[in-house]
């Protein structure tokens, strides 16, 4: 008997829940949206002369686990 896409998705979700997982939905900015790049530029310029920005950048570089990245 053939299964519908929704039945297969439900089966997959059920197996994930049985494995102790739960779904999480995250809303993020649409990088394709009009004005996104302009807003990124605006925020970056606000940090350009911030005395703490270099410290934060160095901490992020030290804390990042990039082993195996290309």
Image: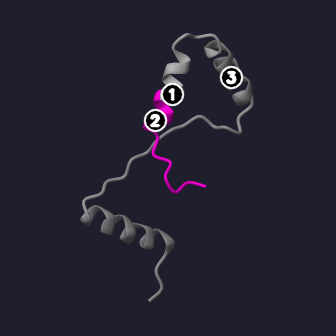
User: Dot 1 corresponds to which residue?
Assistant: 58
How far is disc 3 from disc 2 in space, using C-alphas? 27 Å
Location of residue 29 in the rendering, given as x and y in whole percent from the top left corner: 59, 34
Q: Secondary structure at mark 3?
A: helix
User: Dot 2 corresponds to which residue?
Assistant: 62
The C terminus, quarter of image: bottom right
Q: Vertically, is 51 above or below 31? A: above
Q: Earlier in the sequence, mark 3 or mark 1?
A: 3
Question: As rendered, which of 45 and 38 lies closer to the eye?
Answer: 45
Q: Residue at x 68, y 22 (%)?
A: 39
User: Dot 3 corresponds to which residue?
Assistant: 39
Location of residue 18 by image quarter: bottom left
Is disc 2 in contact with disc 1, using a CB cutoff of under 8 Å?
Answer: yes
Q: Secondary structure at mark 1?
A: helix
How far is disc 3 from disc 1 in space, using C-alphas? 24 Å
| Segment tinted magenta in the rendering | 59-70
The N terminus, quarter of image: bottom left
Location of residue 41 in the rendering, given as x and y in whole percent from the top left corner: 71, 23
Q: Vertically, is 55 above or below 66? A: above
Q: Secondary structure at mark 2?
A: helix
Q: Which mark is residue 6?
A: none
Please tell me whether residue 65 belongs to the stretch shown in magenta: yes
Q: Residues within 10 Å of mark 3 (few under 14, many from 20)?
A: few
Q: Residue at x 44, y 68 (%)?
A: 9
Q: Residue at x 32, y 64 (%)?
A: 16
């Amino acid at each position: 008997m053939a299964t519908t896409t929704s039945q297969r998705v439900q089966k997959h979700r059920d197996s994930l829940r049985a494995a102790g997982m739960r779904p999480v939905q995250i809303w993020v900015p649409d990088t394709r949206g009009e004005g996104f790049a302009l807003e990124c530029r605006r925020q970056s310029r606000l940090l350009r002369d911030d005395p703490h920005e270099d410290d934060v950048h160095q901490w992020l570089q030290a804390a990042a686990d990039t082993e195996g990245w290309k």
